[in-house]
Amino acid sequence: MSVVFWAWIATAVLLALCEAVTGGLYILPWSLGALGAAGLEAVRLDTGWQWLVFFAVSSVVLIIVQRSRLRRQ
């Protein structure tokens, strides 16, 4: 595996740890986005696609989490 793959994994783990400390479900979507980008790096797709997936997955998960939080209120 490449250095970029491990950088994405380290980013995902670091963000997940930050989420565990805060517990507000605001950082978790970014961690999942980093995992998605790591998956693309594992299959050797271009860095541009990795960033696109990182932001897309993070945004979609953030919207889903926030909508579910609003429904519970």
Image (cartoon, rainbow, N blue to C red):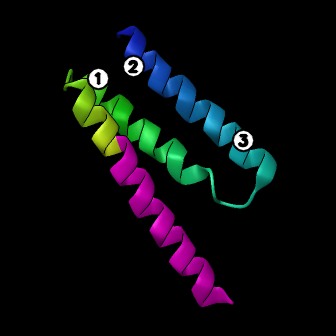
Residue 67 is one of the magenta-drawn residues: yes
Question: Residue 34 occupies which quadrant of the picture?
Answer: top left
Marks 1 and 3, how far apart in space?
24 Å
Q: Which of the image's four quarters has the C terminus?
A: bottom right
* Residue pictured at 60% horizontal, 32% vertical: 13
Expressed as whole percent of the image width and height from the top left, the position of residue 65 reads 54, 69
Expressed as whole percent of the image width and height from the top left, the position of residue 68 reads 55, 79
* Residue pictured at 74% horizontal, 47% vertical: 20
Which of disc 2 and disc 1 is earlier in sequence?
2
Circles 1, 2 touching at the beta carbon (< 8 Å): yes
Q: What type is the residue that disc 3 sits on?
A: Cys
Q: Is residue 46 above or below residue 37?
A: above
> Mark 3 sits on what residue?
18
Marks 1 and 2, how far apart in space?
7 Å
Which of disc 3 and disc 2 is earlier in sequence?
2
Q: Which mark is residue 16?
A: none
> Mark 2 sits on what residue?
5
Expressed as whole percent of the image width and height from the top left, the position of residue 43 reads 21, 24
> Mark 1 sits on what residue?
42
- Highlighted magenta segment, given as a residue range: 54-73
Q: Is residue 72 above or below residue 40?
A: below
Question: Mark 2 Cα within 10 Å, few/some/many (few <14, many 20+)?
Answer: many
Total number of numbered discs in the rendering:
3
User: What element does badge 2 sit on?
Assistant: helix
User: What element does badge 1 sit on?
Assistant: helix
Question: Residue 10 occupies which quadrant of the picture?
Answer: top right
User: Overall secondary structure of the magenta stretch?
Assistant: helix
Q: In this view, does 18 lie above or below 56?
A: above
Q: Is residue 28 left or right of residue 63?
A: right
